Image (cartoon, grey):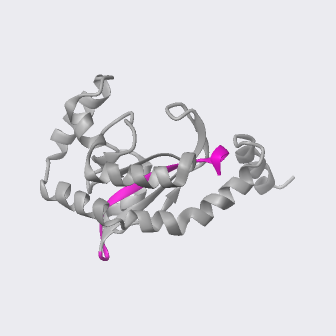
């Protein structure tokens, strides 16, 4: 057995039985996800938040408070009720249960809007933001499938740059439920 075959079997062992077919379906969703990443409401809110130039230490303090408080605080309500969150929720509603969650981040990895409460506010230390923002150059990232405890489903997280014209200003992450494809 070749090393590639072994690696493929190991990866597929962690997916639902038709996992390879679901991954192909995720690939077919990419054009629509790219359009979502350029949604005017998302771009507008990311630009607005970037313009505030919040210091990273302030963002990290907000992140500590976010993680330490399980209740829905006024700050969490603001993020979950933002214009970009409403736009993401409309997209999720249109797509059905295939979208487990979606969230958009600014140029430092701080949440701008989300369809559901995330485990943390600051995503800037995670591959989903680091790779998709990519130092302002942008890149797409499709992470390995995993069982997401928060959504109780097998998902693939797809992250894409959010652009204002050609300039990368933030990032978008969409969790695709493999069992709902």
Q: Residue at x 44, y 55 (%)?
A: 91
Q: Residue furthest right?
A: 1
Residue 107 picture quarter: bottom left
Tell which of 138 and 25 is nearer to you.
25
Q: Residue at x 65, y 60 (%)?
A: 25
Q: Is residue 10 left or right of residue 113?
A: right
Tell which of 146 and 80 is nearer to you.
80
Q: Which residues are magenta?
A: 165-181
Position of 139 relative to 11 (above/below):
below
Residue 136 picture quarter: bottom left
Q: Is residue 50 left or right of residue 144?
A: left
Q: Is residue 97 magenta?
A: no
Position of 128 relative to 67 (above/below):
below
Q: Residue at x 50, y 58 (%)?
A: 141
Q: Residue at x 47, y 50 (%)?
A: 93
Tell which of 144 and 7 is nearer to you.
144
Q: Is residue 39 left or right of residue 99?
A: left
Disc count in the image? 0
Q: Residue furthest bottom?
A: 166
Residue 76 coordinates in the image, percent (x, y): 26, 35
Answer whether residue 156 is visible to the viewer in this image: no
Answer whether residue 107 is visible to the viewer in this image: yes
Residue 108 coordinates in the image, percent (x, y): 26, 52
Q: Please tell me whether the stretch drawn in magenta is mainly helix, strand or loop.
A: strand
Q: Is residue 96 left or right of residue 120?
A: right
Residue 10 coordinates in the image, percent (x, y): 74, 44
Residue 21 coordinates in the image, percent (x, y): 73, 56
């Amino acid at each position: 057995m070749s090393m590639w075959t072994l690696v493929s079997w190991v990866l597929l062992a962690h997916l639902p039985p038709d996992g390879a077919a679901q991954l192909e379906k995720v690939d077919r969703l990419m054009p629509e996800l790219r359009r979502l990443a350029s949604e005017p409401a998302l771009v507008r809110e990311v630009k607005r938040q970037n313009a505030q130039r919040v210091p990273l230490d302030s963002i990290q303090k907000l992140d500590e408070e976010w993680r330490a408080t399980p209740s829905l605080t006024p700050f969490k309500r603001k993020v979950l009720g933002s214009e970009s969150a409403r736009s993401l929720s409309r997209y999720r509603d249109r797509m059905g249960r295939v979208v487990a969650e979606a969230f958009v981040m600014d140029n430092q990895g701080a949440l701008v809007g989300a369809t559901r409460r995330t485990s943390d506010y600051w995503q800037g230390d995670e591959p989903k933001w680091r790779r998709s923002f990519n130092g302002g150059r942008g890149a797409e990232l499709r992470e390995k499938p995993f069982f997401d405890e928060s959504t109780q489903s097998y998902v693939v997280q797809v992250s894409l740059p959010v652009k204002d014209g050609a300039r990368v200003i933030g990032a978008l992450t969409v969790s695709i439920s493999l069992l709902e494809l």
